[in-house]
Amino acid sequence: MLQIFFKVYKHHVHLQMDLTLASDSTSLSYWLSWGFFFCLLSVLTSVIVASFLIWKYEGSSNTERAYTLFDGEAWMPCVKGLSPVWLMAFRIVASCLLLSASIADVVTHGANLFYYYTQWTLILTIIYFMFGSLLSTCGCMRQHNMHNAHSKHTDAETGMYVPLAIAGTDKSVNELGECYFSETGAFWGYIFQIFFQMTAGAVMLTDGIYWLLIFPFLTIVDYEMSFLTVVVHSLNILLLLGDTAMNSLEFPWFRISYFILFTALYVIFEWIVHVFVSTWWPYPFLNVSEQYSPIWYWVVAVLHFPCYAMFALLVKTKYFVLSRWYPESYQLRDALIGKRLSLDLTFPIGFPSRASVVGLVIRPLSMHVFSAWTLESFASRVVANNAACVAGDARP
């Protein structure tokens, strides 16, 4: 096993060696073999299982209550005392660091790096943090506008008794924060949550295999690693763990399906490339002409489950520790599920059920229509909703 993984790594760090090409992968006889049939069977089985999980659980009424995404979960921290600005700043810095590392790696080792799953994972992580930076920026701007509108509304009602209103500002801010978590999340918030779970699984698989299986063997042969090699295989998971420690995202188990589909897409990409070009394989076990390649395909497929489960356990542990040790500062998400509120708007902003696939198109368009409203109209509706939320009189 270690010999096979070391052969993989020799490709990855571009050791000075003679690369042996596999048999001609552009010929029909290469693909008409039992080895490819069993490899194809493993990929198809994974895709079918993942698709079934999405069909059964994504948007289903059975999981709606447990895994409903609240509006603030994409950009508000899990601790009330931590400002969303800190999470936004962290995501922006993480995006810049990962993008710089990726560019430096490609400049140093060439564009062939995009044949590797490691580089695919790095790009996926960059997309996640860029997406998160955008949502955090929009969320912070929205929070700022809502607080300003709420302050003006309070001043207009209290008149000359403004000092009394100021004394209760902290309480009002906390109550407004709970209102964010009481609103059903929008379409892009669900897409971001899916990216989070897909990225977490891919990072655990990539970095776990490298540090647990490849790195110990390299220490035996006294191989000197480059700085970029360490950065590419560690920076992504460190930044992702930092984001996980602060964010409020849940980690539903059935969304391992997106992680599986991501890996299946990579494998299919490699097959398509080798159908048209007879070139080297980035990982030896991907070569379907190898004797034990079908076994490796199934092993990698099974490895998705412990990798995803380990990260899910980290998320569960975080929420357990916060709820037990810091109950006053923890955003009580589960307690808000029973009393969640929805904005009194003319369009639905929840994640569409599988029966209403057209919602995937309608909701983003509705957001653009909504953005055309005047600021005064929007502020008045939001203030009315938040006032009702604070008073406890809003409709369930």
Image: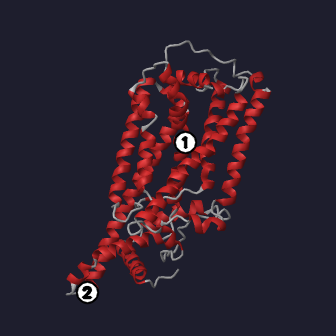
Please state which of residues 213 and 390 is positioned toward the viewer in this rendering: 213
Question: What secondary structure is found at the residue carrying circle 2?
Answer: helix
Mark 1 belongs to which amino acid?
A: Ala
Q: Which residue position is annotated with label 2? A: 158
Mark nearer the viewer, 2 or 1 = 1
Q: Position of residue 122 (x, y in %)?
A: 48, 38
**Residue at (72, 26) in percent of width and height:** 292
**Residue at (51, 69) in percent of width and height:** 334
**Residue at (56, 23) in percent of width and height:** 6
Q: Position of residue 185 (x, y in %)?
A: 50, 65
Ranked by sequence position, the earlier of labels 2 and 1 is: 2
Residue 33 position (above or below residue 303): above
Mark 2 belongs to which amino acid?
A: Thr
**Residue at (40, 25) in percent of width and height:** 226
Q: Which residue position is annotated with label 1? A: 202
Q: Position of residue 195 (x, y in %)?
A: 52, 50
Quadrant of the image occupied by residue 145: bottom left
Question: What secondary structure is found at the residue carrying circle 1?
Answer: helix
